[in-house]
């Protein structure tokens, strides 16, 4: 399946993010009224996610991936830009609207060890959203639905009676997914859902998420550090660097014909099973660190690490422009 199938003209997006910026106030420098410190976490980020589509969001630590996902879910305030869900603006949703929206939009966390309350039985963990939203009156009423959800994610029927410590990381993440599905959402932000798991079981959890997507027509924003993890599940992939999206393209174009030097550097780190393909791939490394989010440079944020940097890159920030059908990149020189 390719992203094309999910981008038919006329298909309206489920989620639309337009010029999203999230700035965090990090207090003042020094003790006595120094300069205000503003963290530029996300700036001018735009993308759509269509029904049944997975958008992979990839970038190194601190690039603003979680902040983007959390902003869509109403968990961090939006500084600028707009967010739409099913065509309706939800940018500055209040507490009640966020609660209502959580029926349709859910979060799957990175760390299945930290995100499940160790003192709650699995049945209580999975039933919690059903109780909070008044879908069921009590835990007895929830039992049948919880059993159905546990079966759906491939856990044994008696799992509900046990505590999280009885399960492996992969099984715990299945519990997290069952809980996220309880209210029959249409959209899930999966924030590095397999990063904390053994490499050997990552594929199982990714496959499960893919099966659930085709069963229920779910849309995902699937966040990851590296391009290897998102390959199989994503229809399109957005590459994030220091708060900006630097490339956004159909999945196969990202792997076969990447444009931005940062995408190409990320790709150099992904092993290819086919040696001729590996050799043919133009390797690129970009040593150095991302800019300080308290004081990002004007111009392109990648300038300090880019092998192709010119004066234009220092003077002005590039915006995403079309390179091929289904591929946009933000770069002056590529
Ligand atoms: N509540 C907050 N207050 C201040 N700064 C924040 C807050 N949340 C995130 N940040 C900062 O915003 C930037 C983006 O953080 P974010 O967590 O979105 O990155 P990320 O891409 O998800 O990183 P990781 O891969 O490590 O999870 C970082 O510089 C981070 O320190
Ligand atoms: Mg994160």
Image (cartoon, rainbow, N blue to C red):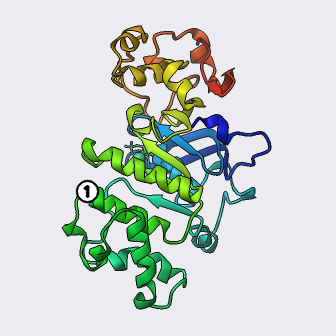
Front residue of 312/244: it is 244
- Where is residue 234? Give x, y as percent: 51, 39
- Where is residue 135? Give x, y as percent: 54, 83
Considering the numbered disc 1 on the image, is that residue within a helix, a strand or a loop?
A: helix
Q: Is residue 138 above or below residue 264?
A: below
The reply, left or right, for residue 108 in relation to residue 69 is left
- Where is residue 13? Give x, y as percent: 70, 48
Going by the picture, which residue comes out furthest to the left? 166
The residue at 59%/46% (across/down) is 53
Whether residue 37 is visible here, answered yes or no, is no
Quarter of the image with the C terminus in it: top right
Front residue of 205/319: it is 205
The part of the image, by quadrant, that contains residue 159 is bottom left
The reply, left or right, for residue 19 in relation to residue 188 is right
Q: Is residue 266 above or below residue 8?
A: above
Front residue of 270/312: it is 270
- Where is residue 1? Give x, y as percent: 57, 37
Q: Is mark 1 within 8 Å of ligand 1?
A: no
Marker count (numbered) = 1
The residue at 38%/63% (across/down) is 176
Q: Is residue 10 above or below residue 144?
A: above
The reply, left or right, for residue 206 in relation to residue 258 is left
The residue at 41%/48% (across/down) is 207
- Mark 1 residue crowding within 10 angstroms, few (<14) / some (14–19) / many (20+): some
Whether residue 127 is visible here, answered yes or no, is yes
Residue at the disc numbered 1: 169
């Amino acid at each position: 399946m390719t992203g094309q199938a999910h981008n038919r003209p006329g298909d309206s997006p489920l989620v639309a993010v337009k010029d999203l910026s999230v700035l965090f106030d990090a207090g003042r420098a020094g003790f006595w009224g120094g300069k205000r410190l503003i963290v530029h976490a996300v700036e001018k980020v735009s993308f759509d996610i269509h029904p049944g589509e997975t958008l992979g969001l990839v970038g190194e630590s601190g690039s603003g991936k979680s902040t983007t996902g959390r902003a869509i879910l109403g968990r961090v305030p939006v500084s600028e830009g707009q967010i739409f869900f099913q065509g309706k603006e939800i940018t500055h949703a209040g507490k009640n609207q966020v609660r209502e929206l959580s029926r349709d939009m859910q979060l799957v966390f990175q760390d299945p060890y930290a995100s499940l309350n160790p003192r709650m039985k699995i049945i209580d963990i999975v039933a919690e959203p059903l109780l909070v939203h008044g879908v069921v009156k009590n835990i007895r009423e929830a039992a049948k639905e919880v059993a159905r959800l546990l079966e759906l994610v491939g856990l044994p029927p008696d799992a509900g009676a046990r505590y999280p410590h009885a399960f492996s990381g992969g099984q715990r993440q299945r519990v997290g997914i069952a809980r996220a599905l309880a209210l029959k959402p249409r959209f899930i932000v999966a924030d590095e859902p397999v990063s904390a798991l053994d490499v050997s079981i990552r594929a199982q959890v990714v496959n499960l998420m893919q099966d659930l997507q085709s069963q229920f027509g779910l849309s995902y924003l699937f966040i990851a550090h590296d391009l290897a993890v998102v390959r199989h599940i994503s229809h399109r992939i957005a590459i994030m660097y220091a708060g900006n999206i630097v490339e956004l393209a159909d999945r196969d174009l990202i792997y076969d014909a990447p444009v931005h030097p940062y995408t190409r550097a990320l790709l150099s780190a992904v092993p290819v099973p086919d040696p001729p393909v590996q050799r043919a791939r133009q390797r690129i490394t970009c040593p150095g660190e991302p800019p300080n989010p308290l004081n990002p440079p004007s111009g392109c944020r990648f300038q300090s690490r880019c092998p192709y940097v010119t004066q234009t890159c220092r003077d002005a920030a590039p915006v995403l422009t079309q390179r091929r059908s289904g591929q946009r990149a933000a770069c002056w020189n590529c």
